[in-house]
Image (spheres, grey):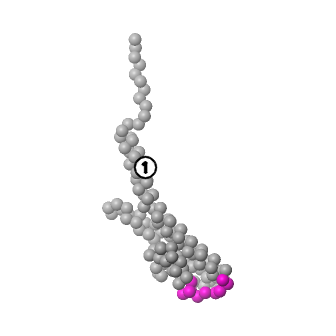
């Protein structure tokens, strides 16, 4: 009676370890990056809130008033530590509209000397 060798199927232990390392690394990076984008959502929400409030009120506010209003909203959302006055530019355009631009970056230390840098540049035009 002849015995035929069985075909081996499945992953070896080394390939399972490699897959585990890749999946673990992706999870580790996601845990580091997701809070950055959640805070960015709060910043864009603050910009939209300023726009809606000013347009609904119909009052033409000065750049200092707009900046104060924006920083109050950012403070309520607990993201005022991300944005400084140097990151915000408020300018009146020739059309009479006011444009608020926020440009900032977030550096998150991952491990050792490796960091993640995420840059954001958002603007809103108030009519």
21 in the magenta segment = no
The magenta-colored residue range is 57-66
Residue 26: x %, y % from top left: 43, 53
Q: For residue 82, which quarter of the picture?
A: bottom left
Give the residue displayed 57% in from the left and 79% down from the top: 100
| Residue at the disc numbered 1 | 23
Residue 3: x %, y % from top left: 40, 17
* Position of the N terminus by quadrant: top left
Give the residue displayed 37% in from the left and 65% down from the top: 109
Q: Is residue 117 above or below residue 80?
A: above
Q: Is residue 75 above or below residue 32?
A: below
Residue 118: x %, y % from top left: 46, 66
Task: Tell me the SS state at disc 1.
Answer: helix
Does the rendering let one see residue 80?
A: yes
Give the residue displayed 55% in from the left and 71% down from the top: 44
Q: Residue furthest front?
A: 76
Please tell me how crowded label 1 is: few (under 14), some (14-19), or many (20+) other residues with Cα within 10 Å.
few
Does the rendering let one see residue 83?
A: no
Give the residue displayed 48% in from the left and 82% down from the top: 85
Q: Nearer the viewer, residue 24 or 125?
A: 24
**Relative to residue 22, is residue 120 drawn left or right?**
right
* Position of the C terminus by quadrant: bottom right
Residue 36: x %, y % from top left: 47, 66
Q: Nearer the viewer, residue 42 or 93?
A: 42
64 in the magenta segment = yes
**Relative to residue 90, is residue 19 drawn left or right?**
left
**Relative to residue 115, is residue 97 drawn left or right?**
right
Q: For residue 66, which quarter of the picture?
A: bottom right
């Amino acid at each position: 009676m002849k015995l035929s060798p069985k075909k081996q199927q499945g992953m070896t232990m080394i390939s399972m370890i490699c897959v585990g390392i890749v999946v673990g690394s992706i999870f580790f990076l996601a845990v580091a990056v997701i809070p950055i984008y959640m805070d960015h959502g709060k910043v864009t929400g603050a910009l939209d809130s300023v726009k809606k409030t000013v347009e609904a009120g119909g009052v033409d506010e000065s750049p200092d008033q707009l900046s104060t209003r924006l920083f109050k909203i950012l403070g309520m959302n607990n993201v005022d530590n991300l944005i400084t006055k140097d990151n915000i530019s408020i300018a009146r355009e020739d059309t009479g509209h006011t444009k608020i631009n926020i440009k900032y970056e977030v550096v998150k230390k991952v491990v050792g000397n490796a960091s993640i840098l995420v840059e954001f540049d958002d603007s809103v035009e108030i009519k």
